[in-house]
Image: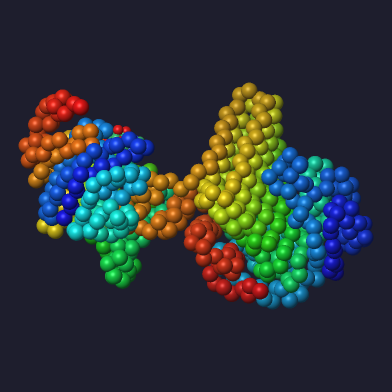
Amino acid sequence: MLVIKDLHAKIDNKEILRGINLEIKAGEVHAIMGPNGAGKSTLSSVLAGNDKFEVSEGTVTFNGKDLLALPPEDRAREGVFLSFQYPIEIPGVSMVNFMRTALNEHRKYNNLEPLSASDFLKKMRDKKNLVEIDSNLTNRSVNEGFSGGEKKKNEIFQMAMLEHKLAILDETDSGLDIDALRIVANGVNKLKTKENATIVITHYQRLLDYIVPDFVHVLYKGRIVKTGGKELALELEEKGYDWIKKEFED
Amino acid sequence: MNITCRVVNLQEEYTALFDEHLSTLQAGAPDKMNALRLEAMESFKKLGIPSNKVEDYKYSNLQPFFKGDFNLALSNDAAQAGVTATFNCEVPALNTYNIFMVNGWYSHQNDISLLPKGVIVGSLLEKAKENPALFEKYYGTRTPIGSDGLAAMNTAFAQDGAFVYIPKGVVVDKPIQIVNIMTGDSDRLVFQRNLIIADENSQLKVMLCEHTLSTQKYVINTVTELFANEHSILDMYNIQNQHNFTTQVAGYYASQKKHTVLQTNHLTLHAGFARNNIKIKMDDEFCESHMNGLYLLDKNQHVDNFTFVDHAYPNCVSHELFKGVMDDSSVGCFTGKVLVRKDAQKTNAYQSNNNLILCESAKMNTKPQLEIYADDVKCSHGATIGQLDDDAMFYLRARGINPSEARILLMYAFAYEVLEKIKVEALKEQIKGLTERRFRGDFDKCDSCVACGADGQMSCG
Ligand SMILES: Nc1ncnc2c1ncn2[C@@H]1O[C@H](COP(=O)(O)OP(=O)(O)O)[C@@H](O)[C@H]1O
Ligand SMILES: [Mg+2]
């Protein structure tokens, strides 16, 4: 589904991603772990198409298409969904309006008619129940005044609405208490199918108890320096990142 | 009576015009109006029409706009004939008491019989004659004819406008909407004068809606005096929807007494060259004032808001929020003058002016001007000029939303803070809708009419 080859990206002439290679198949869950500043958010931003970062080398294909050639909105419509580490507040724009606009743009891209108002509202209701988000959150402006946990839940709700093929969850667990974490993880698990894939970016092993990865990658200084099974996450939890840092000091 | 004038050399010709038609200007007008008229003319001869050499007008040279060939209505014939027939305006969503002014003259009003007892609404000229004591107590007492050439000019020439008086203790249930219509088939110079008084313990929401119905060039010089007496709550909404060939200079001179809450809202959705002088005087202790503004500019529009809050007494608070969006080669200007006089201890004054510049050729001038002579005060001011936030833009695009649509959503989000301050629910919804359509660019003259909204019942010339 996703093939990343030798991906380099920089900002202000500072190279942040320094040759990432990664292949993800439908149905898989990949965890990406790594210390602060390793480049995890940069990788997700680059995949989603944030032009703040300049891709200087490498290729990314997504279901056979050259992902890097597409503007962010088309990547989203192709099925890339990024759950932001820091979701943005947009006062005055209602969740309903935001989701309807987004969903109908996805549908247009796929040559589908816009959803009728009643079908849309039904879909909102269904997905709200699925991801257990409070009804009143979707009656408000996008993320405005939401707590950290509410913002993360709202990301998962949007993911449910937009029916992704590849979900990139950037620290979706940070700032969540244990109950919220469970709700968010449940939501993610319910949205998992054989046809879609998930990248879970996290600092802590805890989330991976709920969303069990097939592969765990360690990102350090812009490179994937280690790949293993879910036991690698436990090892990192136990030993911290220092041994990785020592091993890959350059 | 309608005259045509040609103005090239401003002071001289306006003075000559005044002298020539003085008897018409005076005819039937109250004594105080005529007395101030002469005084104001003397002052106008000295001050003239401000160019940008006048410090308070440094961003707006008004002189060129007052030159040219204009028609000037010296009686209300125009307001009575024809126009009202084509102005078939029903305002179902906005449940308001409506009064209509045409080219500065009182035309007619609806539903006024339903207003609470003692409320006076109508033509300034008529009501002044019926209520001389009231008129004399207030008229001209706030207007700076000695220092502002445009205020002097208005006072010299104005004959009519709207008069609103809310007696003690009366709460007006619905907003009173003053619809100012510019229409006709010739270029026109208009002087309008409004007097709005909320007496002790009363509550009033008043809307001043400015429309242009025909594509002629209009030069409008309006003065509105507002008085909030003890314990009154007065909200004023000015909604400006004028075509690009309109020049409007509008003075809003307000005075607040003890324990009053005044909210002024200047919503400039569409204009040509607009200058607002918004001057609030806190004339006693415990006044609370909220000054809000939103200006949306494109093409070569020019909107200049000059605000002045005079904290003359202790224990008053003022909040000021002006926001603007400038596109194309438009120019926005904001001056926020706050004066805290020596004895005005425990003053709280907050001001912010935030601006979005959408392209490089657009311009914004912003100038806070704080003069603080008391020591126990809390004052803050902040001005920002920025572009649309890249992170927010990316967030929307990452959900599959087009950049153009994302831009509209973000502009709307920016304006929203001011829209939220509108206390008339139906008006808030209507202005929100209009703001969004303004950003979408589908804003033709008729749509832009707040009075009729999308009903399109008005013939738009
Ligand atoms: N907008 C930016 N401007 C400059 N440097 C940035 C920017 N965003 C990220 N970086 C730098 O890139 C590196 C990786 O950041 P990031 O991808 O956020 O790391 P992680 O998500 O793994 O904590 C850090 O050194 C960070 O300082
Ligand atoms: Mg990060």
Q: Residue furthest front?
A: A57
Q: Position of residue B116 (x, y in %)?
A: 65, 59
Residue placed at 80% from the left, 58% from the top? B67
Q: Nearer the viewer, residue A232 or A98?
A: A232
Q: Quadrant of the C terminus of chain B?
A: bottom right
Q: Nearer the viewer, residue A188 or A139?
A: A188
Q: Position of residue B102 (x, y in %)?
A: 73, 66
Q: Position of residue B288 (x, y in %)?
A: 61, 39
Q: Quadrant of the N terminus of chain B?
A: bottom right
Residue A218 versus residue B461 in the image, above or below = above
Residue B240 visible somewhere in the drawing: no
Q: Quadrant of residue A106?
A: bottom left
Q: Nearer the viewer, residue A79 or A95?
A: A79
Horizontally, is A215 left or right of B228 in the view? left
Label count reads: 0
Horizontally, is B111 left or right of B107 in the view? left
Q: Position of residue B313 (x, y in %)?
A: 68, 32
